Image: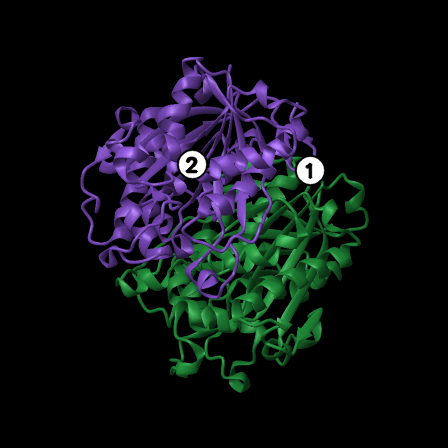
Chain colours: A green, B purple
């Protein structure tokens, strides 16, 4: 039976199944440790378009189509789309998915949007509002640098605490447990923990791991309390894009609450690049980071039953150019999603 | 029984109740025809803060608190918050509602976000994921002008097709039909129709009514088809912020489909200002426009049973400064929400 747990969690009785997942990335991601796992590696950073924003829209559209293809479905069969990106007013999404003509819920949770979209899509499917729904997110290195930091032409120096925005997108087709679409699907979303805004006062936009780690710690802590579980009951607890410095902070924060993540924690941002050889400093980031790693790396491990239960916690830094220039801190948010194989 | 209808609609079996609604606006809105209906008219456009963005955050926080006060609730009793605004990366929301510490789903649907937030909040409450949830949106004239057009200091000329962004916010507390919170509440959300992105190629950001009218027409048409109803079965069909020119376009577009809105249609943007004396040209706009008019004007009419059934269709123009400067068209989206008194 589906039930509310604690302050912010839901446990699904008949968990929605993931019946299709796709990842498309750029060449830098293709050169990284997970390169052989992505569905498509696109060598043209503009994806055949004229601007970085159009490139990201095309990336999102291609990924949505690839996920439908893998699920053996067309857009008429997807009832709702839960989608977002990092750009102001979500333009990568608005322009990208237009031609699919699927009813859209536009989302913004910074890099946590992957978790937010999977949460809402699973809620909709589990409640019977849709037999199938799609969760879709993207990021693009060049559009994000322009949006949040400097145009690439400036060749700005990057401190070692920065992360590198992933050019990538992940799309997920969810189907209701009892539906014919779900037959044979072995990975499901068994629960969610919805994040709240957490602000420790970090103001450095070149150090987003520090800004987001407190939100990740809060969501992981509340998730374990709400479900009455120990961290060891997960094969992995995987954050979105804290990077290597954020990971250290996360572990320290949870250790204060007697939760030990050593040996259990991974971070999509640390998995997607080889920081030593790819000059990505603290790791990868962006809506597309957690989404692409989930589709290419995490879900296949669950399908092969190498892992039985994973908590994915995409993390978002809720800043804008304006808030940064006005001297505001960078609050974080993190949404937890539990994946299990059945 | 809750059931899916058509391509994008849901009809609720035990419709979620609206147990608290609040509106806070600026002085220009207070001087308008609905001025006597808003809960609070704040004379200071900065809401006691230093920047326009902080002002909008404060506006959103105050409105959320006022809605909880009117519902006799505190933030601990609100399980989920569905919220958004017009600013890049939703910073009015992220900073505004931080201290409430309610688990947050951040949304972006431009000025349609009011409809999107009410759709998702009603879906969550109807499915039993929350006994109570809040939908919250805001806009601020000065932060929006800076975000989408020119800084106020430029004193830019405004063509007659422009709308005036409402400084205002609306907050709505929804409770599950069977819950103790819902006792005595007489207005409910009986159904929703979720919009898809519609683009007729309009590129003029000073003519948003024309950009959004096709999306409104699409959602209204699909709503009537999905529910098998005639327009006359609604006391009013009320769009968010098409303004006077957009209204004409909407009526023309629906007339082509044999739907006549004369005598049934109103537009929140046309209701909130007196265009003749307030220099607002085509009307009001912004996430806060539909939200404040819903809380102050539409819901009370339903509570007094002057109206029995209203379809509210907040409309959004999915542009950003970047997309505009790159010469892109302005796609629209519109989300329909049905309110009825019981």
- The tag on residue B244 is 2
Q: Residue at x 70, y 71 (%)?
A: A40
Helix, strand or loop at mark 2: helix
Quarter holding the N terminus of chain A is top right
| Quadrant hosting residue B66 | top left
- The tag on residue A317 is none
- Pinpoint residue B333: horizontal percent, then vertical percent: 54, 45
Dot 2 alpha-carbon crowd within 10 angstroms: few under 14, some 14 to 19, many 20 or more: many
Pinpoint the chain carrying mark 1. B
Closer-to-camera residue (A115/B230): B230
Q: Residue at x 45, y 13 (%)?
A: B305
Task: Name the residue tied to disc 1.
Answer: B7
Please say whether residue B183 is visible from this viewpoint: yes
- Pinpoint residue A303: horizontal percent, then vertical percent: 74, 59
Q: Residue at x 77, y 51 (%)?
A: A73
Closer-to-camera residue (B192/A115): B192
Q: Is residue B270 left or right of residue B199?
A: left
- Pinpoint residue B224: horizontal percent, then vertical percent: 63, 28
Closer-to-camera residue (A233/B303): B303
Up the image or down, B326 lies above or below A126; here it is below
């Amino acid at each position: 039976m589906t039930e509310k747990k604690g302050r912010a969690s839901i446990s699904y009785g008949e968990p929605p199944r993931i019946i299709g997942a796709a990842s498309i990335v750029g060449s830098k991601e293709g050169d990284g440790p997970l390169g052989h796992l992505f569905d498509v590696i696109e060598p043209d950073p503009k994806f055949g378009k004229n601007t970085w924003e159009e490139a990201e829209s095309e990336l999102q559209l291609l990924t949505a189509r690839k996920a439908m293809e893998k699920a053996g479905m067309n857009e008429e069969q997807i009832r709702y789309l839960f989608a977002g990106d990092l750009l102001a007013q979500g333009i990568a999404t608005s322009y990208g998915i237009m031609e699919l003509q699927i009813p859209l819920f536009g989302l913004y949770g910074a890099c946590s949007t992957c978790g937010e979209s999977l949460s809402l899509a699973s809620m909709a499917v589990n409640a019977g509002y849709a037999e199938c729904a799609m969760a879709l997110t993207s990021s693009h290195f060049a559009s994000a640098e322009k949006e949040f930091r400097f145009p690439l032409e400036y060749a700005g120096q990057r401190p070692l605490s920065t992360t590198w925005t992933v050019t990538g997108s992940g799309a997920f087709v969810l189907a209701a447990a009892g539906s014919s679409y779900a037959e044979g699907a072995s990975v499901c979303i068994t629960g969610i923990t919805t994040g709240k805004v957490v602000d420790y006062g970090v103001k450095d936009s070149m150090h987003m791991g520090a800004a987001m780690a407190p939100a990740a710690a809060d969501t992981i802590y509340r998730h374990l309390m709400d479900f009455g579980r120990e961290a060891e009951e997960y094969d992995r607890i995987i954050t979105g894009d804290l990077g290597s410095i954020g990971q250290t902070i996360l572990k320290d924060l949870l250790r204060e609450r007697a939760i030990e993540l050593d040996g259990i924690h991974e971070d999509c941002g640390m998995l997607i690049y080889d920081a030593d050889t790819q000059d990505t400093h603290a790791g990868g980031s962006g809506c597309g980071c957690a989404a692409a790693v989930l589709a290419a790396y995490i879900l296949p491990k669950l399908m092969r039953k190498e892992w039985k239960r994973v908590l994915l916690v995409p993390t978002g830094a809720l800043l804008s150019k304006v808030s940064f220039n006005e001297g505001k801190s960078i609050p974080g948010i993190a949404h937890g999603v539990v994946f299990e194989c059945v």
